[in-house]
Image (cartoon, rainbow, N blue to C red):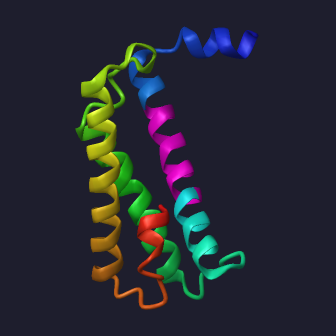
Amino acid sequence: MPLLDKLAHLPRSVKQCLLALMDVTLLTLSIWTAISLRLGAPYQPPTVLSYFAILGGAVCGAAVFYRFGLYRQVTRYIDATGNLRILYGVTLTMICLGMFVAVTRYESFPRSAFFLF
């Protein structure tokens, strides 16, 4: 419990940065999992550009979540408005990932993975 006590006493901005970092990590993992599920095998990105496309989509997702105010809201007391914010944030993240894949011309990205994401 000493680690939880230390985390609880950190300033709010540090907690928000830690949460954003965790979101980038989990979004990267979810994009990789969606591609792996679509291909039926663990995905190995073929080029460095592939890594940038996946990581760029995850960073864009964290920025969208921040813009929608998901890091300010206490999820213990979430209401219908908060649920809509999450839905809008995830939808916009999926659109941003699609745009990021299109801009980087990442041809081997399966288009149906967006729906698994």
Instruction: Please tell me how many numbered marks the rendered image carries.
Output: 0
| Residue 57 place in picture, x, y as percent | 39, 63
**Taking 12 as reference, is 3 left or right?**
right
Quarter of image, res 88: top left
72 up-or-down from 51: above or below: above
Quarter of image, res 8: top right
Q: Nearer the viewer, residue 49 or 65?
A: 65
Q: Residue at x 27, y 35 (%)?
A: 84
Quarter of the rendering occupied by the N terminus: top right
16 up-or-down from 7: above or below: below
| Residue 85 place in picture, x, y as percent | 27, 36
In the rendered image, residue 64 lying in the magenta stretch gets the answer: no
| Overall secondary structure of the magenta section | helix
Q: Residue at x 28, y 81 (%)?
A: 103
Residue lying at the far front in this picture: please name it: 80
Q: Residue at x 44, y 77 (%)?
A: 112
Q: Nearer the viewer, residue 29 or 63?
A: 29
Residue lying at the far bottom in this picture: please name it: 107
First to last magenta residue range: 17-29
Q: Nearer the viewer, residue 95 or 5?
A: 95
Q: Nearer the viewer, residue 12 or 87?
A: 87
| Residue 45 place in picture, x, y as percent | 60, 81
Q: Residue at x 44, y 33 (%)?
A: 17
8 up-or-down from 86: above or below: above
107 up-or-down from 29: above or below: below
Quarter of image, res 81: top left
In the rendered image, residue 22 lying in the magenta stretch gets the answer: yes
